[in-house]
Image (cartoon, rainbow, N blue to C red):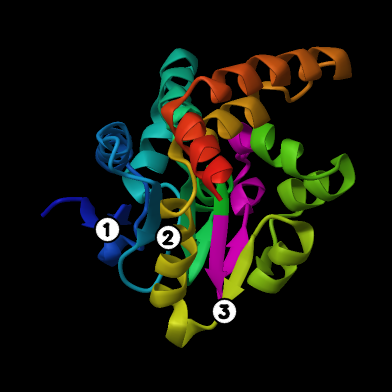
Amino acid sequence: MSVILVNDQDSIRTLTLNRPDKRNALNDELVAALKSALRGADDSVRAIVIRGAGKDFCSGADLSSIQKIATASFDENVEDARVLAELFELIREVKVPVIAAVHGRALAGGCGLATACDLVVATETARFGYPEVKIGFVPAMVTAILRRNLGEKKSFELLTQGFEYSAGEAHALGLVNQVFAEEAFEAEVQKYAAIYSRVSRAAVGLTKRLLYSIDGQPFADALASGAQINAKARMTDDCKQGIARFLEK
């Protein structure tokens, strides 16, 4: 049984974490398959949706992975952590929007995976949280992402108190873009993702690259980066064709 199910509908690729009996817990096989599926998206894909099979989005690391952590050396643990860090980096490198569609629970590494996506949508009953501190662990890689989304005080609270929070609370914090009713979730996710089939793929990809590259840059440097991306956008076929259509009106 494949641990990742790939479904292409129109221009939307849906990647389903397919370990429902393990609440889609992350292990080396699942992370590797997810990386491969992300890299495999061709130019016909306008957006990628990541969802979970069964009752939950993703419950974090599976038991075997946690057991491996407990007995590994420092260098082995560094290498193991890099595997997940590479996934988070890859999500930002993919040219199209990556959307986490969260139902049930997204906890620990599963919450990190959702947070690492460009956009997050959730059911009204979805739950999020970083409970790692309860077993003496640190949600370390996601800290780099969470801190870019939130201020220090709220980031510190979420990362160090280990409590679960609702989709509504996540939406209020800006960690979830849209909250949809449970019964309409799949249709609403597809509708939301399909927005990217109606806008320029090149422009979205360049915007994504710019948004993430200017983080932490001085204002003048960010403007300079913007000028470079602006010029690149003007040279794309999408822009040239869009201008031609505009002038024809």
First along the sequence among labels 3 and 1? 1
Q: Position of residue 81 (x, y in %)?
A: 47, 27
- Quadrant of the image occupied by residue 241: top left
Q: Position of residue 110 (x, y in %)?
A: 48, 52
Q: The residue tagged with tag 1: helix, strand or loop?
A: loop
Residues at discs 1 and 2 in contact (Cβ within 8 Å): yes
Q: The residue tagged with tag 3: helix, strand or loop?
A: loop
Q: Is 153 left or right of 125, judged from the image as shown? A: right
Please rate how many residues cluster around mark 3, counting C-alpha atoms within 10 Å: few if below 14, some from 14 to 19, many from 20.
some
Tell whether position 168 is magenta. Answer: no
- Quadrant of the image occupied by residue 121: bottom right
* Front position in the image: 45 or 15: 45
First along the sequence among labels 3 and 2? 3
Q: The residue tagged with tag 2: helix, strand or loop?
A: helix
Read off the residue under disc 3: 125
- Quadrant for the N terminus, please: bottom left
- Quadrant of the image occupied by residue 247: top right
Read off the residue under disc 1: 10
Q: What is the magenta range?
A: 120-142
Residues at discs 3 and 1 in contact (Cβ within 8 Å): no
